Image (cartoon, helix red, strand yellow):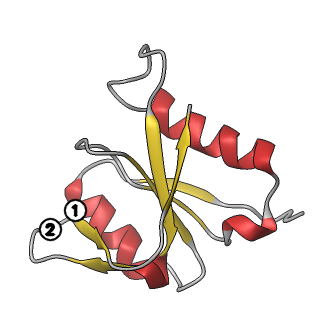
Amino acid sequence: METNLTIQIGKNKMDNDKLFESALGHHTWFHIANERSAHLWINVSTSSISKNQLYQIALKLKKKSKFSKTNFVDIIYAQKDQLQKTEIVGQIQITGKSKKIRV
């Protein structure tokens, strides 16, 4: 289990863009599915954390969003090497594999 887990959450589209630029290929991105929301990044691959840690990280993103009081929200996540930036600042496109967790 990873002990040096760092979580970063973007405050706006410029912040989301900076977080993408500073992330390494194995870092993991989280985002509320099909909604405009902050981007959350962890400095590890999800394969190095427990299912409980994964759930808690996704829950943290939900709690920081306008969906904090919603019963269930789908959170998508993917490693940076499965993503690419678009021409729109702060927007990311999934080009590879992603997964979903409901919190």
Residue located at (26% from left, 71% from top)? 93
Q: Residue furthest right?
A: 1
Based on the displayed image, in which of its 4 quarters is residue 37 positioned? top left
CA separation in Å, label 2 and label 1:
7 Å
Q: Nearer the viewer, residue 28 or 82?
A: 82
Residue located at (52% from left, 56% from top)? 8
Residue located at (49% from left, 27% from top)? 63
Based on the displayed image, in which of its 4 quarters is residue 91 positioned? bottom left
SS label for mark 2: loop
Question: In the rendered image of this protein, does residue 43 appear above or below residue 21?
Answer: above
Give the quarter of the figure containing the C terminus. top right
Task: Choose mark 2 or mark 1, whichever is in front.
Answer: 2
Whether residue 71 sits left or right of residue 86 in the image: it is: right
Q: Residues within 10 Å of mark 2 (few under 14, many from 20)?
A: some
Whether residue 38 sits left or right of residue 103 in the image: it is: left
Do the residues under discs 2 and 1 have CB atoms within 8 angstroms?
Answer: yes
Q: Residue furthest left?
A: 87
Q: Residues within 10 Å of mark 1 (few under 14, many from 20)?
A: few
Residue 83 percent across, percent down from the top left: 37, 77
SS label for mark 1: helix
Based on the displayed image, in which of its 4 quarters is residue 87 positioned? bottom left
Instruction: Report the amino acid beneath label 1.
Output: Met
Residue 34 percent across, percent down from the top left: 26, 45
- Numbered circle sitting on residue 14: 1
Q: Which residue is mark 2?
A: 89
- Numbered circle sitting on residue 72: none
Residue 81 percent across, percent down from the top left: 47, 85
Q: Nearer the viewer, residue 85 or 96?
A: 96
Q: How many marks?
A: 2
Q: Nearer the viewer, residue 8 or 29?
A: 29
- Whichever of labels 2 and 1 marks the residue nearer the N terminus, that label is 1
Instruction: Report the amino acid beneath label 2.
Output: Val
